[in-house]
Amino acid sequence: MATVMVNEGLVTIVFGPWERFLTGHGRYTFPLASVREARVAGEPLRVPRGARKGLSVAGHVKIGVWGLFGGRRQLVSVTRDTPAVHLLLDRAGAGGEFDEVVVSVPDAGRVAAAVQAVVT
């Protein structure tokens, strides 16, 4: 399971071994200032949209990159039983790779609140 850390003006997501393989990232770091909105996704499996590269087991898990051929590009690692933090990014400010990050973490509410407090 991924971990999300917020410190020193950066958001860092560290992925576990399987997530690394499926997302193509062991670690993804971007400036906190590039976050436009942070919220909790109560049903995280409904968030990813579009064509994907990664794993999707209907009703259980989604890990990888969504939105490959247009639309919002999303970095995703979510499971059915764990809430997720859903970060909407300024793509250019976050390094130009993703518009959204959706990651299941047990303390999604705390992470979203910490990020949103800085954003507003």
Image (cartoon, rainbow, N blue to C red):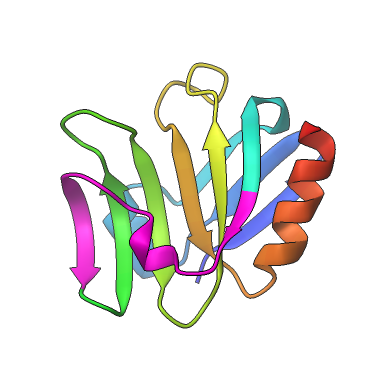
Is residue 53 within the magenta segment?
yes
Residue at the image point whose x is 20% and y is 36% from the top = 68
Q: Quadrant of residue 57?
A: bottom left
| Closest to the observer, 6 or 34 | 34
Single out the residue that lies furthest toward the bottom.
81
User: Is 81 situated above or below 24?
Assistant: below
Side (left or right) of 73 relative to 52: right
Q: Position of residue 34 (x, y in %)?
A: 63, 26
Q: Quadrant of residue 72?
A: top left
Q: Quadrant of the C terminus?
A: top right
Is residue 106 within the magenta segment?
no
Q: Position of residue 12 (x, y in %)?
A: 63, 46
| Span highlighted in magenta in the image | 39-57
User: Is 65 situated above or below 57?
Assistant: above
Residue at the image point whose x is 22% and y is 64% from the top = 55
Q: Position of residue 9 (x, y in %)?
A: 79, 33
